[in-house]
Amino acid sequence: MGLLYTRMKIFHFKEKIDSLPASVDKILAPVHIRIKPTNTCNHNCWYCAYRTDNLQLGKDMVVKDRIPREKMLEIIDDIDEMGVKSITFSGGGEPFCYPYLLDVVRKLSRTQVKFASLTNGSLLNGELAEVFAHNGTWLRVSMDGWDDESYSAYRGTKDKGFTEVMENMEDFKKLNGKCYLGVCIIVDRKNASHIYELAKRLKGIGIDSVKIAPCLVSNSGRESNEYHKPIFQQVREEIVRITGEFGDKEFEVFDSYHSQLETFEKEYNWCPYIQILSVIGADLNVYSCQDKAYNIKEGLIGSIKNMRFKDFWFSDKNKFFKVDPSIHCAHHCVADAKNKIVLEYLNADREHLAFV
């Protein structure tokens, strides 16, 4: 198994990188598309960025929105025709609550487009689980609680919610499919002392990897850092312990916790990843990124409600430069480090390239 979380993946698509600047007329298909099929969720996590007032993500989200079945199948046809490499289903809501997801992944299974999903794992069963197991590339289950009581407190679920998700994941691994199954542990002050025991249980049921990430409590990097300050070193020590005791070829441990707690301000003026990883919302709007999804004022690139995605994408390249990260993106950004690498590559002086 190679590196799963490396920021260098985009450099395997050099033609795409070279097409990105505004000075280049060519528009190529996005490499990756994140689709938010529904805004409905069967959990109610207290920290959910789409449902808290103090985070900009999701501030214009309408919970009842979902992509109509025929429109979704049309989008899949376009994605396949355009040569898009991969799709990730995510929230908004819980992707497995989307009533047409089985139809969609069956269709994707007949294409060359790789697909994956983020999920809370509560509905990871039945035929949908089987299709993902044998045809999907990866699934990542979000977790926070470490037993039934704590899990229910985090998510407002029924009493045995934690047990059911653990059983779903264990059963999924028993399907012996090719799909890689990971878990993202969302860390806050309440569970920081429990991530070791949770990681140990996940290792025991055969999970392939665990990603440890911070609960973000504010658009302000300073405020989020202040929240995590009392547990920052404790979490570092726990991750070192988990990696040392459990990390191996069969169980990858990825520390996203410390890399995400950083200054949120940006010094660059355009975002390459708008053209690399497109985001389609359940409202049929196309957004600049997952961190600006359902933010109409600052994140909207355009709508595909009344047009095909492929026609929207290949029209007018100026739409990809509406967002100025130095002005509009003083918040958490999953693409920030990747953008910096791509921009450094593109800004290299051509006269001096040979002096490596």
Image (cartoon, rainbow, N blue to C red):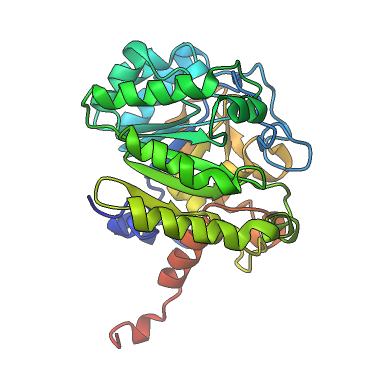
287 and 196: which is toward the camera: 196
Where's the C terminus, which quadrant?
Answer: bottom left
Residue 269 appears at what percent x and percent y? 61, 64
274 and 191: which is toward the camera: 191
Q: Quadrant of residue 303?
A: top right
In the image, taking residue 156 as reference, residue 114 lies left or right, namely: left
In the image, taking residue 167 as reference, residue 94 lies left or right, namely: right
Residue drawn at point x = 27 percent, y = 52 percent: 248
In the image, taking residue 174 as reference, residue 93 lies left or right, namely: right
Residue drawn at point x = 51 percent, y = 61 percent: 237
Residue 296 in view here = yes
Q: How many numbered markers are drawn?
A: 0
Q: Is residue 272 above or below residue 192?
A: below
Residue 306 appears at what percent x and percent y? 56, 22
Q: Residue furthest right?
A: 53
Residue 185 appears at what percent x and percent y? 51, 42
124 and 60: which is toward the camera: 124
Q: Is residue 7 above or below residue 347?
A: above
Residue 25 in view here = no
Residue 329 appears at what percent x and percent y? 67, 55
Residue drawn at point x = 62 percent, y = 24 percent: 152
Q: Is residue 178 above or below residue 355?
A: above
